[in-house]
Amino acid sequence: MNHFISATDVTNIQQLVNKGLQYKLNPLLDAELGKGKRIGLLFLNPSLRTRLSTQVAAANLGMEAIVFNVDKEGWALEFQEGAVMNGTTVEHIKDAAPVLGQYFDILAIRTFPTLKNKEEDYSEMFIKQFIRFAGVPVVSLESATLHPLQSLTDIITIQESIQNSFASKRTPKVVLTWAPHIKPLPQCVANSFSQWVNAWGGANFVITHPEGYELSQQFTNGATIVHDQNEALKEADFVYVKNWSSYEHYGQQLNTDQNWMLTNDKLALTNQAKVMHCLPVRRNIELSDEILDGPNSLVTQQAGNRVWAAQAVLAKILNTLNQ
Ligand code: CP
């Protein structure tokens, strides 16, 4: 694996999931694999889990990780080809990325979408320019449209939960449900979860949201879309809760109906479903306290598993580099 920005970069998702679970049992299994190698973690946006779990994962593999908060500490980057740089941007990606490629063996980058220009966001211009100009493997720490380390974590968590509870004899029903929020959020986590669950193939996958919140079909094809949340929740084994803004009416909030918040009453419709969320979560807006503090919540376990997903991905890239 050269780069990791999408499920399409992975030839065998199950193998990567198994590797993550192997690292969970034995974090220092490959403690020498990254010896003498450096990873640069570049953030154009805030992060708690992605930043720290990737640092821990790199340390477990013997790599040095250096974090650079580009948005606060770096020069403002220009991404437009042919730009006349007489505005606020100071350094072109064509100049900055090759320099970063000289310092690091792997670059990992977090960007967010503008939520204003669908074509630009969905072209993944920012992260693709790093790939084009850095000359080293690039890992997405969340991009304009996808969050692959989160999604790999989510599948690791589902797999782990299946192994630990109801038999792996039957295919679990996994429901991704839209939730209310106070402001428009990217579609990244929902897009990415859909893409990975579909590519993984280990679930009966249902997506539920109010009309107007349809995600891009390039990610949801293969899932069943249901607009009645109660109907969707019936017999669910896992419920993944997430807000996203409209893809069709790009970046807009069409509905903030609090009835879409998951509560214990709704959970009663499910097969005692485990509840997932990528965090951070707006309590009692997206998800109720009773769920988050209750026995069905997987959110802390899920966030903990971010380390093993990152470690599996970094190990795969290091193995390619070491060939
Ligand atoms: N889930 C997630 O990406 O969390 P952070 O924004 O804290 O990294």
Image (cartoon, rainbow, N blue to C red):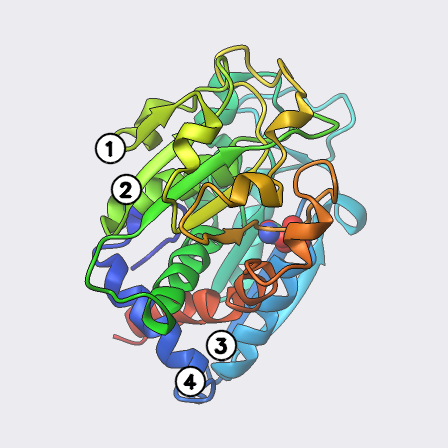
Mark earlier in primary sequence (3, 2): 3
Percent coordinates x, y for residue 197 in the rendering: 32, 46
Mark earlier in primary sequence (1, 3): 3
Q: Is residue 207 above or below residue 251?
A: below
Q: Which residue in the structure is indicated by mark 2?
A: 198
Mark 3 and mark 2: Cα distance apart in space: 34 Å
- Of residues 76 and 142, which is closer to you in this image? 142
Mark 4 and mark 3: Cα distance apart in space: 24 Å
Q: Are marks 1 and 3 in contact (CB under 8 Å)?
A: no
Label 4 sits on what residue type? Answer: Leu
Q: Judge: label 3 CB < 8 Å from ligand 1.
A: no
Checking the image for residue 222, the label placed there is 1
Mark earlier in primary sequence (1, 4): 4
Mark earlier in primary sequence (4, 3): 4
Q: Residues within 10 Å of mark 2 (few under 14, many from 20)?
A: some
Which residue is depicted at the point 48% across and 31% down?
125
Which residue is depicted at the point 40% across and 88% down?
29
Q: Judge: label 2 CB < 8 Å from ligand 1.
A: no
Mark 1 and mark 2: Cα distance apart in space: 6 Å
In which quadrant of the rendered view does residue 296 lie? Answer: bottom right
In what element is the residue under mark 4? helix
Q: Is residue 203 above or below residue 58?
A: above
In what element is the residue under mark 2? helix
Mark earlier in primary sequence (1, 2): 2
Mark 1 and mark 3: Cα distance apart in space: 39 Å
Which residue is depicted at the point 61% across and 22% down?
115
- Please state if 255 lies on the left or on the right of 69 as rendered: left
Q: Quadrant of the N terminus?
A: bottom left
